[in-house]
Amino acid sequence: MNVKQRLAVMAAAAALVAAAVLGLWLSGIHERAADVEPSPFSGNEAESESPDGFPTVDWEYWLSVNPDIVAWVSVAGTEIDYPVVQARSDGPTFYLDHDVYREWNPYGCPYLDAACAGQGIDSPLALMFAHHMNDGSMFSAFASYSDAGFAVEHDEILLQTPEGNERLRVVAADVVDSNAEYKRLDFATGEELSSWLDELLGGADVALVDDARTDSIKAFCTCSYGRWNGHERTIVYAQEEVG
């Protein structure tokens, strides 16, 4: 084997090693962000879900990992099964590129808007964000709620906090242009929130109810692609199930 051949073999071997290292790194990035378990040390998959369908969350463990965690959101039949952290005013987009362990990660972590920090998950409009990843993880499935059939089939969202569980029902899904439509999170009164909800239901791309009355509406936002060259967002609105 001449020198050129040896160099070619060495270069090919180095490329294979680099590819393997990159693959392992990417796998670790994905696992840290997208493969989190509600109770990672239960050791029994059957015990990880309570009789009412809510996954059992080990709050002591997760709050020791990151005290910013305020909730856990799950949607049956999708990849959505993640902790939700509270974004802070001094770093409102921190969790766009940091995972639940607060390490840099392009997957990010679902987070509650920094403007909701005062009342947290009980804000009049508790707005949560996460990425739409090509592998279907994070909040990707919420983009599919712009299809009425999908929304009906997945209209139940399970939301848990250290204080208790909420079984949510989707009331609407709306596709918006983030450059032209701005979020609103402040409502002075319940009547003001109700009026806003009536307007939302009247103009949403998908509305599953005609009327919604609630002290707190939960909203889940992710990117969706098609109409406005990367500025499209799908927002899914849900309220606590009554009765």
Image (cartoon, helix red, strand yellow):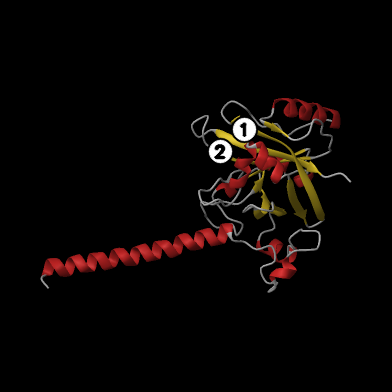
Amino acid on which the number 2 mark rests in the picture = Ser
In which image quadrant can residue 201 be found?
top right
Residue 225, image x and y in percent? 52, 36
Residue 87 seen: no
234 left or right, relative to 57: left
Q: Position of residue 61 (x, y in %)?
A: 70, 66
- Drawn side of residue 159 relative to residue 189, left or right: left
Task: Rate crowding at label 1 as few (under 14), some (14 to 19) or many (20 or more) other CA atoms within 10 Å.
Answer: many
Callout 1–callout 2 Cβ contact below 8 Å: yes
Residue 140 shown left or right of residue 201 in the figure: left
Position of 101 compared to 11: left or right?
Answer: right
Tag 1: amino acid: Val
The residue to which callout 2 is attached is 224
Sequence-first disc among 1 and 2: 1
Residue 121 rendering spot, x and y as whole percentages: 76, 46
Given the current orientation, which residue lies at the most extreme left position?
Answer: 2
Observer-nearest of 127 and 91 = 127
* Residue under label 1: 175
